[in-house]
Image (tube, helix red, strand yellow):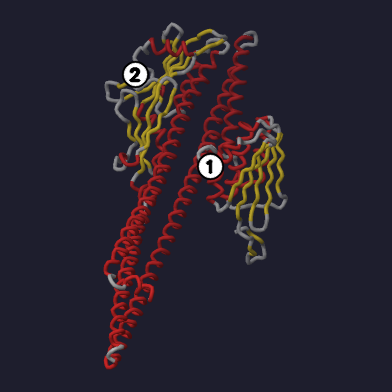
Amino acid sequence: MPVLAGLYQDGGSDRSWIAILALAVGLLATVAAWHAVKAHEQTEMRRATTLAAQAIQRSLLTDVEWQMLGLDRLAMLWEAADPAQTLWTRNAELYIQHRPGCVAVEWLTPSLEKRVLVAAGGRASPRALAFAGLPRALLETVGNAKAPIVSAPEPLSDGSRQWVIAYPVYAEGQSRGFVVSFFDLEQSLGHIMGEVRDLGFSVGLLLPNQPEYLLPGTSRRHEQEWGTVVDVPLSGSTWQLRVWPNADVVNEVKSLLPEETLGIGCLVTLLLALSLYFAAEISRAYARTRRANQALQVEIGLREGAEAELRRAHAELELRVERRTTDLAAANALLQKEVTEHRRAEETLRELSGRLFQLQDQERRRLGRELHDGAVQNLVALAMDVGMIRDAVPAEDSDTRALVDESIELIQQSTSELRTISYLLHPPYFDELGLTASLRDFVEGFATRSGIQVALEIDPNFGRLRCEVELAIYRVIQEALSNVHRHAESPTATVSLARHVEFVQLEVADAGRGIPPEILASEGGRFVGVGIAGMRERIRGLGGRLEIRSDGGGTRIQAVLPVPVPSTSQDGGIRDG
């Protein structure tokens, strides 16, 4: 108190600027904190929108590549000689059947003469097709490039739009013609984009010289604020994809944290300024009391009144200090609430990431099942039919029997490839056999396909875990071995899996060239790649951690996942919680 009295004695009223300065600095700091929290929230929203746009872009490219792969299978029928029209027509019908939105497939000779036109539904006369007569310039471009080209959409008289994939056919270095598939724009994009609706984002697709295609149910409410544009580069054409979040996603990401930061900061600043102001007032009062006390020394009779005034001022000071303590306690409670809201926002973001991975795994399971139960079974049936055709060919017709044998071999090869793709998407009977059996099967198949010797070490008493934990471990091993095959240039790899009382430890190591130090040092930054980021997010979503160590002698990925301690059930058995 003597110090304050010294500060404000004789002109203490001039010291009120300290409270004003504290108020100004506090308000500036509050606005800066509010701006930082707001910028972080916007960054998270743009990051989520960018990830969604990239996922949709990959889905579009994958679907168009799938359309081209089907045309490649049709073109392979020319490898030896022109295929029989019946055989080619049947393959074209299968192509149309398994590609929603495809309205027709046409077979043209090198001189652009129509050989066969197969329409959707087996109709002899398909509905009107875009590019009537197929512009010669388009097919000449395809022939010169010796590569398939995706055309820009073309409007029809009924208001619909169609786009075309033109595929060149070569056998023994000679042009054998063209295979052209026609797609209804709305139907094909509706099928491709059908799975995007569950992500909570609106999608617009801008095609060359065409009106914009909008995903059904799209709202333009947040397009200007959060819209993200990415290009979809196709062979011969580029589509522009625009993605922005719906109101539900915006509401999930946004929170009251910026407003609460602003309110709490203003309140704390105001309390601080008031405290300084009251301190100045108290100091001035103390100075006045001191001067009065000096005057009262002359007049002993007034000492009692001076002492009473001093006690009153002291009581007032204690009361104000008590009030300030109460206010500071309230401000501290508000800060605790802010911390709780921030943690809750982080948990919500983690749950969203887990949901995205769950949807991804469900989609892989569905695609694997559809490939196995659909395309594979159709190829098996086709192989049986072609076998019957072979039996019906006379023995003296060796050329035809050789062509049929080659077709059977191609069908068997395609069946094997589809089964491998189906297995990699989601191993059959994973839920029944569990992680251990599925891993042994996957590692054996990976070693056969890649030529890399993989040593698998699993704890004999590993047992079963929760389904999401087993699936996360399987996906991390799958991605890690894929990186070994694509980047490490290592002849060997080691996978070890051990279970402890409270956690599971996973390790994947290779003897390859390792990860460059500048990329490894940016871990958590921009350069580590989508695969490693996906592994890290899977492990983090289950409460674990993932570490990567790499040098010139190879790369080692270690992951630790917590597991519940087994508890004893009522019947005396042990179960995993």
Residue 429 shows in this picture: no
Q: Secondary structure at mark 1?
A: helix
Quadrant of the image containing the C terminus: bottom right
Q: CA distance from mark 1 to mark 2?
A: 42 Å
Q: Quadrant of residue 308?
A: bottom left
Pinpoint residue 548: horizontal percent, then vertical percent.
62, 43
- What amino acid is at disc 1? Gly
x 29%, y 74%: residue: 284
Q: Which badge, 1 or 2, is on the more N-terminal residue?
A: 2
Q: Give the labeled residue for mark 1.
A: 534
Closer to the eye: label 1 or 2: 1
Mark 2 falls on what kind of element? loop
Q: Looking at the image, which is closer to me, 466 or 204?
A: 204
Frontmost residue, 266 versus 45: 266
Determine whether, in the image, residue 335 is placed left or right of residue 420.
Answer: left
Identity, as a three-letter code, of the amino acid under mark 2: Ala
Q: x%, y% of residue 517? A: 60, 37
Q: Position of residue 36 (x, y in %)?
A: 38, 50
Q: Residue furthest front?
A: 298
- The quadrant in which residue 56 appears is top left
Q: Position of residue 559 (x, y in %)?
A: 62, 48
Dot label at residue 163: none
Name the residue: 55% across, 45% down: 536
The residue drawn where x is 55% and y is 42% is 523
Q: Is residue 552 left or right of residue 222?
A: right
Q: Is residue 121 above or below residue 528?
A: above
On the question of residue 280 being in view, the answer is yes
Q: Are marks 1 and 2 in contact (CB under 8 Å)?
A: no
Question: Which residue is denoted by mark 2 in the rendering?
Answer: 130
